[in-house]
Image (spheres, grey):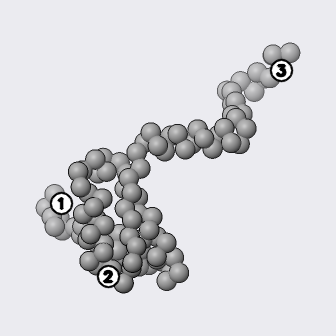
Amino acid sequence: MSLLGKDAVGIQNMLHNSIHKCSADDKKEVFKNVYVSGGISKVPGLNDRLKSLLHSMNPTIPEIEVKTLDIGQIMMEGVKKIIEKGGIDWITKDPLASQKQH
């Protein structure tokens, strides 16, 4: 594959190489939790194609899952965690703000 006149490997090769650097115990778990985000996640059929390519490169791995995360989902998870922790501690630029309220 060529990107801007330079040779580059495909995303499936990058994932395959990265995952195989994990310990044997972690590989199966990582293959079950491949996440795609950003603009590339909007490409129709990308998740299915990526899953198929990873399966062909790793036939001994029984379960490979490719999932999409969008920014809205990420933001809502962040809000959920803030609420679970009991809200927000407000930060102000004025170090004397708490004294001025009294």
Using a 10 Å C-alpha cutoff, classify the residue at mark 3 as few (fewer than 14 neighbours), some (14 to 19) or many (20 or more): few
Cβ atoms under marks 3 and 2 closer than 8 Å: no
Dot label at residue 59: 2
Q: Residue at x 28, y 65 (%)?
A: 50
Q: Residue furthest front?
A: 62
Image quadrant assignment for residue 88: top right
Rendered-image quadrant of the C terminus: top right
Nearest to viewer (mark 3 / mark 2): 2
Q: Is residue 26 above or below residue 2?
A: below
Look at the image and tell me whether residue 50 can be seen. yes
Query: Identity of the amino acid at label 2?
Result: Pro
Dot label at residue 3: 1
- Identify residue for label 3: 99
Using a 10 Å C-alpha cutoff, classify the residue at mark 2 as few (fewer than 14 neighbours), some (14 to 19) or many (20 or more): few
Q: Residue furthest right?
A: 102
* SS class, disc 3: helix
In the visual, does 4 lie left or right of 57?
Answer: left
Q: Residue at x 33, y 80 (%)?
A: 58
**Front residue of 75 and 14:** 75
- Residue 3 lies, in percent from the top left, at 18, 60
Using a 10 Å C-alpha cutoff, classify the residue at mark 1 as few (fewer than 14 neighbours), some (14 to 19) or many (20 or more): few
* SS class, disc 2: loop
- Residue 29 lies, in percent from the top left, at 49, 72
**Front residue of 35 and 93:** 35
Query: Identity of the amino acid at label 3?
Result: Gln
